[in-house]
Amino acid sequence: MINVLVTGVGGGGVGEQLIKALGMSTLPMRVIGTDLDVDVAKHSGADGCHSLPRASDPAYVEKLLGVCRQERVDVVLPGSEPELRAMAASADEIRANVTMVAVNDANVIATCSDKFETTRFLVANGFDCPQSWLIEALVDLDEVNLFPLIVKPTVGGGSQNVYLIQNDDELRMIVGFLLRYYDAVLLQEYVGRVDQEYTVGVLFDGNGNLINSIALNRFILTSLSNRIRVPNNTGRADLGDVLAVSSGVSQGRVEAYDMVRHHCEKVGAALGAKYAINVQCRVADGKVMIFEINPRFSGTSSIRAMLGFNEPDLLIRKHVLGEDISDTPPYRFGTVLRGLKETLV
C-alpha cells in the first residue's frame, strides 16, 4: 500500500483534482487529504483527512511532517500555491521523511509565481509572449498606447482581480483601483482569439527529464469557464467579435496540438522544471504566446487522467515503485466538459 498525502483538498482546487486523478489509478494507494478545516477535507474523497495550519504559519512544516509520520506517508503532493512555496523552502527536510515530494525547486517557483518575472524569463530565453509592462504608479501608464490589454496583479492565481481593458479611461480607472491594494500590477497585451487558448501540462521526472505533455484547447465562452466576456470595441478584427478571459475552470478539447506542446516542453526545459508545470498560452499569428506558467499540478489533472495521462500516477510509478514508464501507452484524445456538483453538509 502506497500512502499519498495531498494538501489543500478543499474548495474544488488543485488538491481535489489530484485526489480525483489518484482515484483513477490502478495502484494500491491510500490517499490522505489535508486542509485548514478537516470537515472540508472530508468532502474531497480522500481515504483519511487531517487539518493543517496555513502555509504561512511557522509551525506548518512541523505539522505536515507530523501527519506524514502518523500516516506513514510515501508521497507528498501540494494542492495549493502557498503550500507549494512552503514545501519548496523546506524540501530537503521533508524529503528526509518521505520518498517523493513533487515540488519544483524554489528558484523555479519564484520565477513563475511572479508574473512579471515570468515575462522576463521568456524574453531572455527567446520565447514569444505578449508585450508587458510593470506598473507601480499611474504615471507609468503614460508609455502604454496599445489596446486591448489584460491587467492583473503580479502575484496570485485563480484569475482573481484580472481585468480586460479596451481604452485609456478603463485603464486608468482599473489600475488606480488595483494599486490601492497591490504594490504593482502587470499589463499584458491581449493576444489571439478566444478559440485559440490552451492550457498545457508538461510533466518531468524529479531529475528534470521530460516524461510527456498534454494540451487542452479551452472552451472559455461557457459560463463556468468564463470570467470576463465583452464585445470587441477596439476595431481589431484579428481578435474576433468577442474578447474574453478564462475563469481558470478549464474544459475543452484534447488533441495532439504538436506545435503548442513541443513549444511548452522547450520552455519547461529552459526553466529547469521538475515534476509538473502548467503553461497558459494562445496561438496568435502562428506563434505560441505564453502569458503565464504555473509551477505545479493543474486544475485539469482529473481531465488528463480521464484521457489516460495520469500525472501523479506516472510519478509514483517512476520514483516510488521504480517502474520504467517510457513505454506507457499514449493518452486518448477527446472533449471533456464540466458542471457543478451539490453537497448537502
Image (spheres, rainbow, N blue to C red):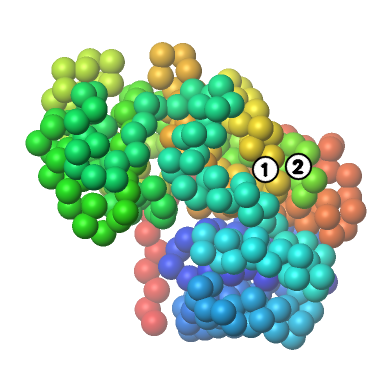
Location of the N terminus (image quadrant): bottom right
> 81 or 136: nearer the eye?
136
Location of the C terminus (image quadrant): bottom left
Above or below — where is 143 with respect to 164?
above
Q: Is residue 74 visible?
A: no
The answer to which image quadrant residue 33 occupies is bottom right
The answer to which image quadrant residue 321 occupies is bottom right
Mark 2 or mark 1, which has the lower sequence index? 2
10 relative to 21 in the view: left or right: left
The answer to which image quadrant residue 237 occupies is top left
Residue located beneath label 2 in the image:
208
Tag 2 near tag 1, CB within 8 Å: yes
* Label 1 residue SS: loop
* Place of residue 252 in the rendered image (x, y in percent of width and height, measured from the top left): 45, 38
Q: Alpha carbon of mark 2 to alpha carbon of mark 1: how far? A: 6 Å
201 relative to 224 in the view: left or right: right
Q: Residue at x 50, y 50 (%)?
A: 113
| Total marks placed | 2
> 165 or 43: nearer the eye?
165
> 58 or 327: nearer the eye?
58
Residue located beneath label 1 in the image:
273
Q: Is residue 88 visible?
A: yes
* Label 2 residue SS: loop
The amino acid type found where label 1 is placed reads Ala
Q: Residue at x 14, y 30 (%)?
A: 167
181 relative to 317 in the view: left or right: left
Q: Residue at x 53, y 30 (%)?
A: 122
How crowded pointer 2 is (Cα within 10 Å; few <14, some 14-19, many 20+) is rated as some
How crowded pointer 1 is (Cα within 10 Å; few <14, some 14-19, many 20+) is rated as many
* Place of residue 260 in the rendered image (x, y in percent of width and height, measured from the top left): 55, 25
